[in-house]
Image (cartoon, rainbow, N blue to C red):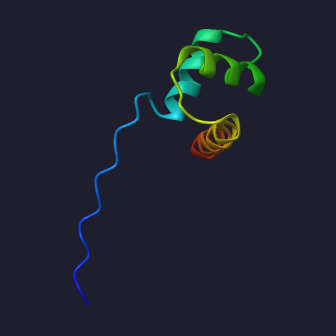
Amino acid sequence: MPAKAAAAPKAKAAHASYQDMITDAIVNLKDRNGSSRQSLKKYVKANNSLNVSDNMFDSLFNKALKAARQEEA
């Protein structure tokens, strides 16, 4: 079998990681009782240039939020 060619390196995203964007949103929204998921999504979309569909954004956002919660626990 012929050797596989090396995979092309993935291009770096033009934005921070989703966990970093969520953390930034929590810090900047400054809600005393915590920020809602809806307000976090709105802040992240408004303050970052994201080139993904709405469904993909929701999926990546929810995955990052869930991972952040599990890291905390």
For residue 36, say whether it is visible. Answer: no
Q: Residue shown at 24%/70% (left/top)?
A: 5
Q: Residue shown at 54%/34% (left/top)?
A: 18
- Viewer-side residue, 45 vs 4: 4
- Viewer-side residue, 36 vs 33: 36
Q: Quadrant of residue 29?
A: top right
Residue 7 horizontal/vertical position (percent): 29, 62
Quadrant showing the N terminus:
bottom left
Q: Quadrant of residue 30?
A: top right
Q: Quadrant of residue 40?
A: top right
User: Residue at the front extreme?
Assistant: 2
Residue 45 horizontal/vertical position (percent): 62, 21
User: Residue at the bottom extreme?
Assistant: 1
Quadrant showing the C terminus:
top right
- Viewer-side residue, 4 vs 67: 4
Task: State whether residue 7 is above or below residue 38.
Answer: below
Residue 46 horizontal/vertical position (percent): 61, 15
